[in-house]
Image: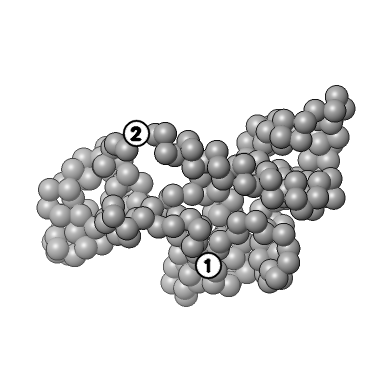
Amino acid sequence: MMNGIVRGNTHRPLDVNEFRAFTIIDEYAHLIFINANDSINGRLFSLIHEFVHICLGINSLFNDKLNTGKNVSSIETICNAVVAEILVPSNVFLSKWRESGKEDAPLDQRIMQLARFFRCGPVVIGRRALDASEIDINEYKHISEEATKHFIETKNSRSSGGDYYATLSSRVDRRFFNLLFKSVFEGKTQYTEAFRLTNTNRRTFTKLAERMLD
């Protein structure tokens, strides 16, 4: 699941500084929730991080900002290490890192060059460089702070508009909606229950169905 507000209330945004994602381990169906207010790269990192928690069978509330490895549980260290290795394999990273430094390029330029190559965020590259002792903690903090600043500036510069139904459909799994719609059509589920499960009403549920059932 992914959302950036509390249910459908646009006046109650989910703060990335409070949490980026969480995982609930359940006997029937595990759940990963991603905070949609995070950056695209941040969401990808969180998704893989939370999937590792599911593999380990451990609940999680994830909020990894300037994680330096201090006062971090062993489980979180393992999850972060797995994500880093998936997104930026260590052997490839070290080769590309040394290659990027041949012409004494500035640190920020090297970080962005590798972020584009690995198709991930600069903070992941910075974390990889820190773990490999290629940069120090102050340089890593600078990279993270600059990435956060850039994300906020980009987000604030975007139009406040958007496609309501595109956003709504992104919060509902297509397979789930198809099964739910079929159940409603067959009379097995009441409309009021379908509205509750999809956070819609009679009008928006019909419009959502036009999107989801194409």
Above or below 71: residue 128 = above
The foreground one among 82 and 163 is 163
Q: Quarter-wise, where is residue 95 in the image?
A: top right
Q: Is residue 61 above or below residue 102?
A: below
Q: Please provide percent x and percent y for residue 178.
A: 28, 51
Comparing 98 with 179, the one in front is: 98
Horizontal side, residue 62 vs residue 76: left or right: left
Say whether residue 130 is left or right of residue 195.
Answer: right
Near mark 2 (Cα within 10 A), the count class, few <14, some 14-19 or many ≥20, is: few
The residue type indicated by label 1 comes to: Leu
Q: Are marks 1 and 2 in contact (CB under 8 Å)?
A: no
Residue name at image x 47 percent, y 73 percent:
26
Q: Position of residue 206 (x, y in %)?
A: 16, 46
Residue 183 can be seen, yes or no? no
Q: Read off the residue under disc 1.
A: 61
Picture quadrant where residue 9 is located: bottom left
The mark nearer the N terminus, 1 or 2, is 1
| Image disc number at residue 126 | none
Q: Residue tagged by mark 2?
A: 159
Q: Position of residue 154 (x, y in %)?
A: 48, 36
Instruction: Mark yes or no: residue 13 visible.
Output: yes
Q: Which residue occupies 44% across, 68% down?
A: 29
Q: Report the mark closest to the observer, 1 or 2.
A: 2
Residue in front for this viewpoint, 210 or 60: 60
Note whether 183 is above or below 134 in the view shown: below
Q: Residue at x 59, y 51 (%)?
A: 45
Q: Is residue 154 left or right of residue 133?
A: left
**Quadrant location of the C terminus?**
top left
Q: Amino acid at mark 2?
A: Ser
Q: CA distance from mark 1 to mark 2?
A: 31 Å
For the point 32% across and 58% down, the residue is: 12
